Every structure is written in structure tokens, then in C-alpha cells.
Amino acid sequence: MKPALKPSLILPLALAVALGAAWASPAEAARGFDVRDLHALDRVSSPVLSPDGAFVVFAKREMSGAKGDDPGKASTSLWIRDLRTRDLAPAKRLTPVGWNVNSPAFSADGKWLYFLSAQSGTQQVYVMPATGGTPSQATHYPLDVGSFKVSPDGRRLAISMEVFPDCGADIDCTVKRLEERKASRATGVVYDQLFVRHWDTWEDGRHNRLFVTSPGTGKSRPTTFLVDSSTQSSGVGNVPSKPFGGNDEYTWSPDGESIVFAMRRADRQEAWSTDFDLYRYRAGQPLEHLTLDDRTGANAPSPGPTGQNRAWDTGPVFSADGSKLYYRAMKRPGFEADRFALMERDVATGATREIAPDWDRSADGIVLSADGRTIYTTAQDMGEHPLFAVDIASGKVEKVVGGGSISSFDIAGDTLVFTRNSLQSGDQVFVTSLSNPQAERAITPSASQVLPDVAFGDYEQFSFPGWNGETVHGYVVKPWNYEEGKRYPVAFLIHGGPQGSFGNGWSYRWNPQTYAGQGYAVVMIDFHGSTGYGQAFTDSISGDWGGKPLEDLQKGWAAAQQKYPFLDGDKACALGASYGGYMINWIAGNWFDEAGRSPWKCLVNHDGVFDTRAMGYVTEELWFTEWENQGTPFDKPENFEKFNPVNHVAKWRVPMLVVQGEKDYRVPVDQGLSTFTALQRKGIESKLLYFPDENHWVLKPANSVLWHDTVNDWLKKHIGQ
């Protein structure tokens, strides 16, 4: 299931073949890649450029204190690199040793660097000289600051905090209520609408709200900046959205006099609505509802609305002169995997248009060029995640940087900095120019440079005729110790989402190299429903979970074995999480040859759906199950039963490892326990790996090591190595 109402975070995969010579050969390397290597590697992220493009600052997560199976403790700091030099001088640490920091941002004049840290006990905004110095605390609140954005003139901060809506700007009111709840001997909570829990957290009545304050004087209470409980025209909502929303969901106007933000109303429809709208706040004026829907048509702003859109609008960005507002918009209400189109709104007239209507990809974000003529954005594309340039006037789209998965980027003038990962390396920071993007240079090392004694499995993308003869793509990864003429057992990985992709990218949860490092070959199929192959291909899975995707997996497995003779089809295990876990349950009762034999020696199901009808009543984001099954479980029960694994348990016979997190409210714990109960009751060899402190993902490093060791032991027992 998708992680949240955000573009799929499921990672794609693979770097340009030209880089293949850089990797150590099996003869030169001593071993394959292991989960302990995965966690020991530094992780770089969030590159930001100074306004003149002279410096890049990025975050780097490092591990310390590793011992045996304990991967140690993580800490994240900020580092700076002078881009005006081409020598080999490394980046230098900016923030103090021992601090954990995130979210770097330059001031408009480039003299100051802002970031978030919980060094004071709560997460607050800090500021320091951009090229080094002692950080100063810029906000002083008893609540965590969740996100921030510096005003264009640098005199104010927009910050978000979780508060009780009726407390408004009275921060002490929220603090007092939390303290009273903690002191109360009664623990019961009364709810009168959904959500009651979301992702991995039970709702406590607080909402994310934006406030305005002045950096350096944060001890004063901020002014309420957005809606409060009396704003009936817009209702109450979270800004940014929960649980994964950030400061890309709101923006200052160039003159610093207003903010535009995306919000979904937290009313009784929230759990089955994807209706995010854009609002504009200007001091002393009524809140403007810019992307109006028919529930609030009587409150049309002036000037006129962009149109009635009950789907998802987000990511606002102003042009430099403030005359245009750019944003991303979906068209179909209730569908979280719809295509995000790039939109332009004339601020004066309210007229809107789609910028590149013929571009059949879903834009991830918006970064404007210095001259305001081009939008830069990333999007999934044919198993990779490149950076694209979109001409605003004509809608023409060009690929700027590919060769893997671009995870983040920033632009200053002609300078482009980005992080890119691939199947053979985690993120590296690269710098180049927009005028000559091919002249990129890496300023952080690759995984192979950090681990010279490790060999990574080579890979290749392939295609085959899938359902209805339509082209489907997949990847094959060789084991680290591959030798021509030998055959190898196979880990067959099935991605989640289901609107996701296993392509050319690096994952810290489902990384093919951890299987290749154990001596397995890996096969991954981007079945119908996967992203990056056009919206129609993505749409095709809805209402057909066990149909086209299963046929693609079957044909892809057959095509891979025919094309790659080193795959040992008699020694193969299928593994998947979320929708991939659902497919494991579906495969268990529906994938047999003419003699009634399963092709799999074992199965691994992580947080997979066992009963689709029960899932429709117990999951939190109801829009997901209702779109995918084209109705509710009480209006359309037959849709929920059509591809329901629970109806095929009688045919299960393959050994299965079940993994389940207690705090997974997307695919709740009853689904995993039901799967394990069914296996045990039928007498099928099975194990349950249960995490009381993990959600839909396994995030704690020590738990991740246990997860990988348990999975690898299961594979070793059933397919060798």
C-alpha cells in the first residue's frame, strides 16, 4: 500500500552502463554486499545551493559505535563544499559534532544558513553564518517546529507546529492540555470522526498549523497565520499535511506579504478524500480559496477561482515577479496515484492552464529557472527517475540528467546540484551546469569507493510481452560472484504501492544488492500498475489486483528464465511487501502449473493484505481501498472478494515467512496474524517475524539487521547458498 498521500516513495533502480567499469570485479573483491554494509554507509541528502551558486550545503548521516549485530547510533550533520574550486579538497563539517540537524536553507542574501535541530530539547530553527560559525537558536517554543521557510527579505520565518485548533496561537494552551492529559489517570479517548489513527500514530486532536515569527526573537509568541476553528469557509486542516508533508506545501509570495498553502480539510470526509486545495492568506484580508471545489462554491474568492477541482492540488511556487503561481494538480478525486500535471495560474485574473498536457508523466515538484521560463522537475520514467526541464511557454519537455534516480536537486543560476542513486550505490552529491549537464562531477563518494572490498552485482533491464501483449519491463541482477556458465538461485522481488516501481535506484529496505551479496540472482518485474510507463499503464491495476499483474509476473518470470540461463528456476523464492505482500498471498493460492505445482520453494510476505474486504474496514486511508476496489466494502462487496487471498487459503502449500509491524496502520497487524494463523492451521512450514515498534516499514537499524538476517536464513534454508 502507498506510504501516504504523497507521490510514491517506493524507490526505482540502475546507473548508466558506462559507469560499470568503476566497480570492482569479483576477482578483485573479497565479498558481496551485506546489510551491515548498508547501514554503515554514510547517507547524503538535502543539497542546497547558495544564491550565487558558489557553495553547496548538504546533510550527511553517519553511524558510530557499531558492534557485532548492533549497527550503532546515527547522527546527521551539515557539510559545505566550495564549488568554485575543482581540486580534491573534501567538504567540511558546518554544524557542531554531536548535533542532529536537518532541513538546511540559505537566506536570500546567502549570508546565513538555517536548519532544524532538537539540541535544545524540542526541535527548533537555528541559524549560523553560511560559511561557518556558532549556531544560534532562532525560535524558542515548547513545541517542536516541524518545518519552516524563510521569507524573501529574511526578516520572518513561516514555521509549522502541532497545536489544538481551538488554542489558536496560544502555544501555552496546547502545552497545558498535553500536560493535563499526561497527568490524568484516565486513558480513554473519544472520537467522533475518522482518522482515529494514521500511518503509525493515533490521533490526539492536534493539527499542523503555520505561524509567523522573527528569527532570533522566537521567545515571543507567534501570530496566528492561517485558519482557525472559526474559519468556516475553509474548515480545519493540517498544513503541512500528515504524516509526510513538508515545506514544499506552502510558499511565500515574492513581496513577503502573503503565503499560499495546500490543505485538505480535516472534516468527516478526510479519510476518504484526496481533495487538497490551495489557499492564500494576506494579512487583514479574508482567506482566499484558490482551487475551489463545489462544497465551498458560495465562498468564491476574488479574483475568480481556478476552477472546481476536488482532486489534489499542491506544491505552490510563485514566479519571481509574483504574477504567476505554479502548482501541481491531479484530476480524479479519490485517486492518490493519478498523474500530477504542471499548472500555471495568473494571479491577477485567476486564469489557469496546464503547461505540458501531452507529457504522460507525473511531476514530483517545481523548481523555476533563474529567467522564469523553465520548470525543473523529477518524474519516474521507464524504470528510472530522471530530472526534466519543461518549457513553460510551449510545454516542451527534455531530460536533463538521467542514469539512475535523482532524489533531490537545487538550482542557482546556471549551477545544478543533485543527489543520485542507482542499483549499485546510495545517493551521491553531484554538481554540474544547466548549460552543460553532461559535465557532472561527484563531490561525495560512491558505495564502491567506500567499500573497495565489496563487489556489486551487475544488472540489466529487459522487456517482454505481458498482459494483452503489451510491453512490460523488468530488471535482472547478477550475484556478486557471478561466473559464466553457472546457475544461481533466485530472489524474485515484487514491489509495493501497488502504483510503484522496482527500477534503477537504491533502497534501504528492499535493496537487490543485499540478495546479490548472498549469492542470489534477483528478478524484478514492473507489472501493469507500475509508475513511470504512462498513466494508462498505472491505472490498469485498479480493480484488477490479481489479474493483469499476476499475468505479467508469470510471463516476466518465464521470459527472464529464457533470456538469462544463469537463473535456476528450480531454486527460487518470491518476496514482497505491502501490495507485494498481498501478491505473495495471492500467488500462494493462484500460481500453479498444469500439474498443480508452484514454481516457488518459499515465500516472504511483509505487511501484506490477507483479506481485502476486512482491509476496507480497518485501514486508515479509505480513499485507497475504495478507489482500488471501485467502491466501499458495503456497496460493492463483490469487488473486494474478486481478488481476495482469504478465499484461496485452501490451496496454500508453499513455506512462508510472515513479517508484521504492530504500528502499521496502513496494513494493520491483524492481516499479518491472520496470514500466519492460516499457515499454522494448515500445517504449512512458516515463521512470523513480529516488530512491536515498527510501522509499515522497518526503520530502526538493529531491526533492519534482524529482518535481513531472518529473510536470508529463510532463503538459505529453502534455496541454498
Image (cartoon, rainbow, N blue to C red):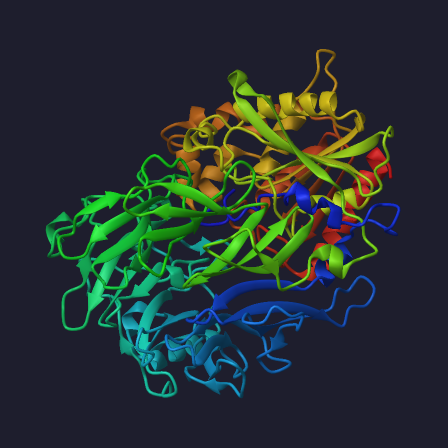
Q: Nearer the viewer, residue 224 or 375?
A: 375
Looking at the image, residue 57 lies above or below residue 353: below
Residue 194: x and y in percent read 37, 51
The number of numbered badges drawn on the structure is 0
Residue 620 visible to the viewer: no
Looking at the image, residue 154 lies above or below residue 563: below
Question: Is residue 195 found left or right of 23 in the rendered image?
Answer: left
Q: Nearer the viewer, residue 105 or 509?
A: 105
Residue 173: x and y in percent read 34, 79
Q: Residue furthest top?
A: 594
| Residue in the image at 45% along x and 63% along y | 188
Looking at the image, residue 334 lies above or below residue 154: above
Question: Is residue 547 found left or right of 93 in the rendered image?
Answer: left
- The image quarter containing residue 335 is top left
Looking at the image, residue 348 lies above or below residue 284: above
Q: Nearer the viewer, residue 417 or 505?
A: 417
Residue 411: x and y in percent read 44, 61
Residue 169: x and y in percent read 29, 77
Question: Is residue 490 found left or right of 188 in the rendered image?
Answer: right
Question: Is residue 471 found left or right of 213 in the rendered image?
Answer: right
Residue 675 visible to the viewer: yes
Q: Quadrant of the C terminus?
A: top right
